[in-house]
Image (tube, grey):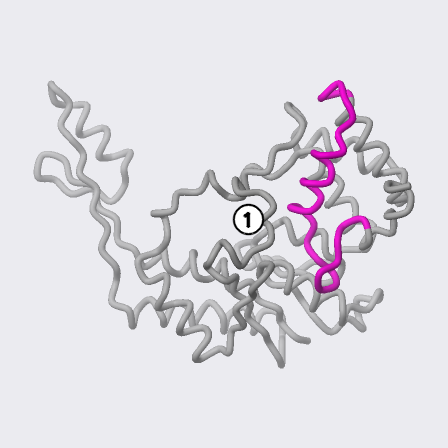
């Protein structure tokens, strides 16, 4: 088994865990903001809350990264692994190029203090590959799809991440937060994409249909057969009801943004086999 590891998540999880946050109120130091707010409200006028962030020693942080990676590899019983990291330059990511507001809702100052050092460590020690042009998710999707076998016992790879978006890729998956290894069938993978075409992805600032969440999207999509042409027209009709017009622009953009590649450079219509139907 080869573990395909989402290095982007490791950078932020290990990095933020090594950032020591403190909240100062009236000379008292609190670990959590909620406790600092309670102390602040006890005074009139309310005492200011001063937030400080200091990193743990870099050695402690990188040791945490080592333990995370080693733990993931052990859990999936892998004898090989590959770590993927997204190029940090926005202009090197096609999603930013076609949609400048992609991930614009994220706080640019929220990067861990050891952000660059963690990335360098994973490249130098774990041979992490920096993905340019697309994202680490696409590399994971392409590698898994290239080596995946429809039979679980014969499948050679496992995507290791906590990102549910990658459930649109068939095969083995491991979520280390939940310590859960699970299998995604091709039908589940395709339907995961169609559900996101309805809901959008708020974490990436990709809009969906108002008031359509994961539960209602699942109720609609899971009730249908695994026919991507039919699923396309069902999703299209739901967008028409929402916009009161033809949604070609929204569908094309959201599909390009949400689709995790299964072959390098492959678009969502091509990947789902619906190109001719939707573009007569």
- Foreground pick, 75 / 196: 196
Q: State the image coordinates of residue 90 (x, y, percent, origin top left).
A: 49, 54
Q: Residue 19 or 180: which is nearer the viewer?
A: 19
Q: In percent of the image, x 36 and y 70: which residue is there?
A: 62
Tag count in the figure?
1
Please name the residue that numbered disc 1 is placed on.
96
Picture quadrant where residue 222 is located:
top right
Based on the displayed image, in which of its 4 quarters is residue 265 positioned?
A: bottom right
Q: Looking at the figure, which quarter contains the C terminus?
A: top right
In the rendered image, the vertical position of residue 228 relative to residue 125, given as above or below: above
Range of the magenta residues? 241-269
Q: Is residue 114 above or below residue 278?
A: below
Q: Provide the secondary structure element on which disc 1 rests.
A: helix
Q: Is residue 18 above or below residue 84?
A: above
Residue 39 falls in image quadrant: top left
Tag 1: Cα neighbours inside 10 Å, few (<14), some, or many (≥20)? some
- Answer left or right for 5 relative to 34: right
Which quadrant does the N terminus fall into? bottom right
Residue at image point 37% right, 61% down: 115
Q: Residue at x 54, y 68 (%)?
A: 72
Considering every residue shown, the one lying at the far left of the view is: 27
Instruction: List x then y, in percent, for residue 227.
Output: 90, 44
Spot occupied by residue 165 in the image (x, y as percentages of width and height): 64, 49
Q: Is residue 6 left or right of residue 236?
A: left
Q: Is residue 58 left or right of residue 90?
A: left
Relative image position of residue 166 (x, y in whole percent): 65, 54
Give yes or no for residue 268 being in the magenta stretch.
Answer: yes
């Amino acid at each position: 088994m080869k573990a395909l590891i989402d290095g982007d998540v490791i950078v932020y999880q290990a990095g933020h865990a090594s950032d020591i946050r403190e909240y100062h109120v009236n000379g008292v130091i609190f670990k959590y903001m909620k406790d600092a707010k309670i102390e602040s409200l006890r005074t009139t006028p309310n005492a200011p809350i001063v937030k400080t962030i200091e990193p743990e020693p870099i050695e402690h942080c990188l040791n945490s990264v080592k333990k995370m990676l080693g733990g993931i590899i052990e859990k999936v019983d892998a004898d090989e692994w590959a770590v993927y990291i997204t190029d940090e330059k926005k202009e090197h990511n096609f999603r930013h190029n076609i949609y400048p507001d992609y991930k614009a809702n994220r706080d640019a100052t929220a990067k861990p203090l050891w952000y660059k050092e963690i990335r360098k460590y994973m490249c130098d020690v774990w041979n992490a590959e920096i993905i340019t042009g697309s994202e680490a998710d696409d590399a994971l999707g392409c590698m898994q799809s290239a080596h995946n076998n429809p039979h679980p016992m014969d499948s050679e790879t496992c995507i290791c991440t906590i990102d549910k978006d990658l459930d649109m890729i068939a095969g083995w998956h491991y979520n280390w937060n939940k310590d859960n290894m699970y299998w995604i069938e091709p039908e589940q993978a395709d339907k995961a994409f169609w559900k996101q075409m309805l809901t959008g992805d708020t974490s990436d600032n990709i809009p969906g249909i108002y008031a359509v969440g994961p539960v209602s999207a699942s109720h609609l999509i899971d009730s249908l057969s695994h026919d991507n042409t039919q699923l396309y027209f069902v999703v299209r009709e739901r967008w028409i009801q929402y916009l009161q017009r033809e949604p070609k622009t929204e569908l094309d953009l959201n599909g390009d943004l949400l689709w995790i590649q299964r072959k390098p450079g492959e678009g969502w219509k091509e990947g789902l086999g619906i190109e001719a139907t939707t573009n007569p």
